[in-house]
Image (cartoon, grey):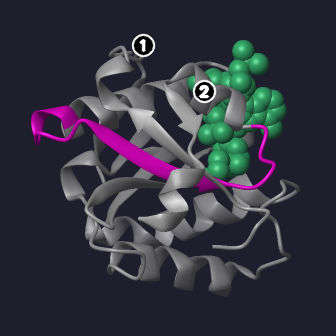
Amino acid sequence: MPRDVVPMLGDLLAVPLQALEQPIRVRMLDPFDTERLGQLMMLAFTGTVDDAGETPEEHRAEADKTVAGGYGPLVPSASLVAECDQDVVGAVVVTEWRRRPLLSFVLVLPQCRGRGVGTALISQSAARLRALGYTDWTLVTHGNPAVALYERLGFREDQGLRDD
Ligand SMILES: CC(C)(COP(=O)(O)OP(=O)(O)OC[C@H]1O[C@@H](n2cnc3c(N)ncnc32)[C@H](O)[C@@H]1OP(=O)(O)O)[C@@H](O)C(=O)NCCC(=O)NCCS
């Protein structure tokens, strides 16, 4: 794992369940969502620290790779999309990596941010992982402002994960 990447461990039992108000609803990610997931990645990552100038096709390929298990097998019941009037406005994708769930990414359309959609996606994903019997999960970040959100939801830097 590169030195500038920060591994974080999250306590699933410390994440409160957070609902969303209508008209936004949360449902499981569907394999047919990968095209829309690619579009969401394009719109959500543009201008962030994770923006490496990828083309729409590269985002689509990344979405396909993630859903197909390129970062460990997908945990389908904990991988969710938020929809508003049939439009996908957010997503959280969880894969299994080294025996633990990995929060691969969480994305919300720029115009829908700051209203709790990201928090609700993470908290509902956590509830589903608890139901599967998991007690903790991981993620990796590198200078993303989302760290404040992750810490609020029980994640802490854990360098010990490098040795797992
Ligand atoms: C991270 C993200 C999913 C949060 O979605 P959201 O719906 O705005 O989240 P919430 O409304 O539940 O919470 C907002 C919190 O996110 C945090 N945050 C995340 N990104 C932020 C940013 N770029 N600037 C400021 N705050 C940010 C803040 O702690 C904020 O809390 P505040 O409103 O009290 O300041 C969204 O900002 C996003 O899609 N970012 C781009 C993609 C990304 O970087 N994803 C994370 C790495 S995979």
Residue pictured at 11% horizontal, 42% vertical? 132
As measured in the structure, the alpha-carbon distance from the residue carrying label 1 to the one carrying label 2 is 23 Å
Q: Quadrant of the C terminus?
A: bottom left
- Picture quarter with the N terminus: bottom right
Residue 151's tag is 2
Vertical comparison of 115 with 121: above or below = above
Disc nearer the start of the sequence (1/2): 1
Q: Residue at x 32, y 39 (%)?
A: 136
Q: How far from the left and from the top, in percent, is residue 138?
A: 44, 49
The reply to whether discs 1 and 2 touch (Cβ–Cβ < 8 Å) is no
The amino acid pointed to by label 1 is: Glu
Most foreground residue, 37 or 160: 160
- Left or right of 54 in this view: 137: left
Which structural element holds mark 2? helix
Q: Nearer the viewer, residue 65 or 150?
A: 150
Residue at mark 1 = 21
Query: Where ligand 1 lies, by quadrant?
Result: top right
* Stretch in magenta: 130-145
Type of amino acid under label 2: Glu
Q: Around disc 1, counting alpha carbons within 10 Å, would you say few (fewer than 14), some (14 to 19), or many (20 or more)?
A: few
Going 49% across and 25% down the picture, which residue do you hit? 154
